[in-house]
Amino acid sequence: MILNTPIQPSVYIIISREDLRQLLADTVFEELQKFTPQLQVALSEDKKQYLTRKETAALLQISLVTLHNWNKTEKLVPEKIGRRSLYARKTIEQVLSGSKS
């Protein structure tokens, strides 16, 4: 079986090591700029917006029973997201700043 693909002529470019290094750096920088919004989202996701009961109790250094009592007394109320009860980080930070002052 013979393939009918045209043969491309070879092209050689002479470039100095420094020019090549700069070309690569510029190209990588341009490509990374395309991903900057996704990187910012990923970094902000690193600091989760919502925490589970265990994560919240650990952050507040309280037991799960105390967290449950705070829920009943409405000191810290979780938000229902789907079937899960999650605590908003902003609400937790408000409780922390309120309890320290």
Image (cartoon, rainbow, N blue to C red):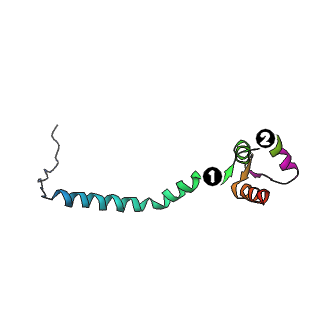
What segment is highlighted magenta in the picture?
68-80
Q: Position of residue 75 (x, y in %)?
A: 83, 54
* Residue at 65% in and 54% down: 49
Please state, as top left, top right, bottom left or bottom right, where the C terminus lies in the image: bottom right
Local packing at callout 2 (Cα closer than 10 Å; few below 14, some 14-19, many 20+) is some
Residue 15 vertical placement versus 58 (above, below): below
Left or right, residue 60 beside residue 12: right
Callout 2 secondary element: loop
Amino acid type, label 2: Ser
Q: CA distance from mark 2 to mark 1?
A: 21 Å
Callout 1 secondary element: loop
The residue wearing badge 2 is 63
Left or right, residue 1 beside residue 33: left
Please state, as top left, top right, bottom left or bottom right, where the N terminus lies in the image: top left
Q: Position of residue 48 (x, y in %)?
A: 63, 52
Q: Position of residue 38 (x, y in %)?
A: 49, 57
The residue wearing badge 1 is 48
Residue 51 vertical placement versus 38 (above, below): above
